[in-house]
Amino acid sequence: MRKLVARRAAVKAASAGFAATVLLAPLLGSGVATAEPAAPHQLSVDALPAELVTALSRDLGMTPTEYLDRAARAQQLRDYATDFRAEHPDTFAGAWLTPEGKAVVAVTDTGTGEVAAADGYQTHLAPISANGLEGALIQLSQWIAHLPREISAPISSVAIDVLNSQLVLNVANTGTGHLLNLPTLIATIKVVLSPGGGGAVENRPMGGDTYITAAKDLHDATLRGVDVCSFGFNSTDAAGNALNISAGHCNPNVEGNGPAGVYLPNVRDLPNSIEVGTFAKSVLGGPAALDYSVIALNERAVNGGMDQPRVRGANGTSLPITGTAEPVTGAPVCKTGQSSTFTCGFVSADRVETQLFTAEGISKTIRGFATSACTLGGDSGGAIVSGTLALGITSGSNAAEAPNCTEANTKLAPYGGTATLGIPIRSILADIDATSGGGVGSGIMVRTKSTAG
């Protein structure tokens, strides 16, 4: 996570906004959705690792059954909302799950609301459509991107808060942040002050299956440090290549300075760590505004089990992946981690944009989703799931410098709690395939229990 130190606290405002407003959103109508698509495939309750069950109770206050049911309900809502928006593009204003797990569809007029209500959904009357909010977000992000770095540095992120029909701008609580003049073209904007930016992130393994990488060979005498990240989802492409999806900023040569190796860390003899692959493709920003890497795994990695549809969690346990999902505000999520264990939360914003600066000072726009799950330094690139479905990979966190999630939760509680920026897995897969040129990554898919060999 070293390269993006300047924007570690990228999603605090989104998390705070959800926690503070979801309980207060006025709802019109009642009842349970009846016209929902079929539920996505999930594992049975007894197939979940015991450590994940513990995390669900600790972090979400949910039973395994409630977690799986709500994760499935979120994807049903997403499917319905996609079709509903296509039919009512000017009046659709968002969709989310309440803390009680009820599906809500927001609209800008009562006539459209009656359509959703007739399908069994709760409805919420909003002043601005989803198209209007997204247009405002684009304008604001463009304005931020063109600011001098010394002026834009206090701005961590901007997110869409569909519950309150507003944008949430997270600004560091500094003198520059207080003096920032916001563009008047944004009528519905909420500014949240957060702690000032921290120092450098300590690079040490804290996440799930961690790996190390460096711009040079590990035996190079001039090497002064390594980057620590986490493997995401095991994948394969049309040619049968064994791949893993991680974060783009984890690649020390993301700007195209040659391939970088990926190693399992040997903490007692770092130069002789075992190489398990190389970065085949990395994206940080660009047209798709994503943060991802494709790691080409070698035979040693495959023989070690990285051709399996699983992500590791606490104490050596693993969770089978049964499919992919899309972020839905209010959906339950969990992050996997070997050292930081399973940690869980909710999707607090299904669209967040942030300007990240590389070590060279180049600004990159990154688009993803925010969750309240705690992630620590070294978790970048790791897997985020909803139920047993692949949801995304970790890009950044406001707890990257904390030694553990207990301390992170305590220190960040006054600012809305822990927050993580995730990159949607379906957007990643689509971009990899579209830009593969028929080579590595063409026809890529996440390995799932149903497709595993």
Image (cartoon, helix red, strand yellow):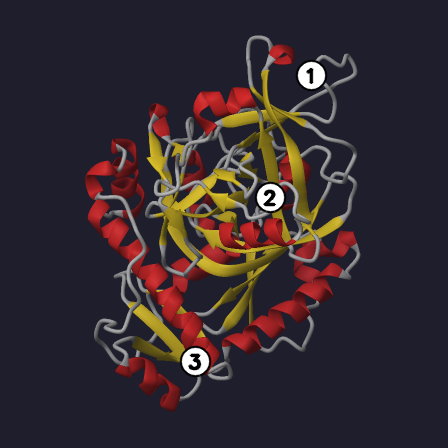
Query: Which residue is situated farthest in the bottom direction here?
Result: 111
Q: Secondary structure at mark 3?
A: loop
Calculate the distance from the C-alpha at mark 1 to the C-alpha at mark 2.
27 Å
Residue 218's disc number: 1
- Dot 1 or dot 2: first in sequence order is 1
Mark 1 burial class by Cα count in 10 Å: few <14, some 14-19, many 20+: many
Three-letter amino acid code at the position of disc 3: Ala
Residue 362 percent across, percent down from the top left: 77, 47
Q: Which residue is under mark 2?
A: 441
Which of the two discs, 2 and 3, sits closer to the camera?
A: 2
Query: Which residue is situated farthest in the top direction here?
Result: 268
Q: Secondary structure at mark 2?
A: loop
Res. 281 visible in picture: yes
Image quadrant in which the N terminus is located: top right
With 317 as the anchor, is 177 left or right in this view? Answer: right
Residue 126's disc number: 3
Calculate the distance from the C-alpha at mark 1 to the C-alpha at mark 3.
55 Å
With 191 as the anchor, is 318 left or right in this view? Answer: left
- Dot 1 or dot 3: first in sequence order is 3
* Picture residue at 39% right of the left edge, 48% below the top: 323
The quadrant holding residue 39 is bottom left
Mark 2 burial class by Cα count in 10 Å: few <14, some 14-19, many 20+: many
Image quadrant in which the C terminus is located: top left
Three-letter amino acid code at the position of disc 2: Gly
Q: Name the foreground residue: 166 vs 364.
A: 364
Q: Name the foreground residue: 47 vs 401.
A: 47
